Image (tube, grey):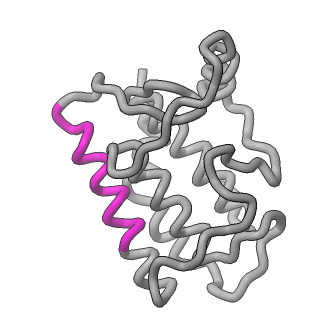
């Protein structure tokens, strides 16, 4: 059963929280500044709605182990690096943090719209494989919690 609390957090509470991150704050770990993190999370939502795509990189025999982590309440470790991204943060896509947050808000809404009529459809995550709505909610929640914590917001 979908964790309604996580869905609701993503849909209504996440953007107001991320909007309160000081644009000049330094992360607790990692190389991304606050705007790069917002744009990174926006890209992650694009991935779940097929606006962005990467091939599966996890060997088939390891998918069950990765899936077990995904569905657990274990957090991502500090400095966990997405294996499909470069070592250095991507340059800003937007001129301002406000523009980046507006895009993120649009991508979050797009995510819920994408799965509204069929929560069972699956889209590909390059590490965790094909995920349905419930699984993406779990992953998005885990991912945004990690990045909020990176910038000093504990949920």
Q: Quadrant of residue 57?
A: top right
**What is the residue that sits farthest to the left in this orientation?**
117
**Which residue is pictured at 68% across the width and 31% down the height?**
73
Q: Relative to the observer, which residue lies in front, 81 or 88?
A: 88
Q: Relative to the observer, which residue lies in front, 139 or 36?
A: 36
**Which residue is pictured at 73% across the width and 50% down the height?**
81
Residue 35 as seen in the image, left or right of residue 28: left
Tell me: residue 96, above or below residue 140.
Answer: below
Tell me: residue 22, above or below residue 1.
Answer: below
Q: Main secondary structure of the magenta part?
A: helix
Give the percent coordinates (x, y) of residue 134: 41, 29
**Which residue is pictured at 73% across the width and 40% down the height?**
75
Q: Quadrant of residue 50?
A: top left
Residue 47 as seen in the image, left or right of residue 126: left
Image: magenta residue range = 103-117
**Which residue is pictured at 47% across the width and 41% down the height?**
5
């Amino acid at each position: 059963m979908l964790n309604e609390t996580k869905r609701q957090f993503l849909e209504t509470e996440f953007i107001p929280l991320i909007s309160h991150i000081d644009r000049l704050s330094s992360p607790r770990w990692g190389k991304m500044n606050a705007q790069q993190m917002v744009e990174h999370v926006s890209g992650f939502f694009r991935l779940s709605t097929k606006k962005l795509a990467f091939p599966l990189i996890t060997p088939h025999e390891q998918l069950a182990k990765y899936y077990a982590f995904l569905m657990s309440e274990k957090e991502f470790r500090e400095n966990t690096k997405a294996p499909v991204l470069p070592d250095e943060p991507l340059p800003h896509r937007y001129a301002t943090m406000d523009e980046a947050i507006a895009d993120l808000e649009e991508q979050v809404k797009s995510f819920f719209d994408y799965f509204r009529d069929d929560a069972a459809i699956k889209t590909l995550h390059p590490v965790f494989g094909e995920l349905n709505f419930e699984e993406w909610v779990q992953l998005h929640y885990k991912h945004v919690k990690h990045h909020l914590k990176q910038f000093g917001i504990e949920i």
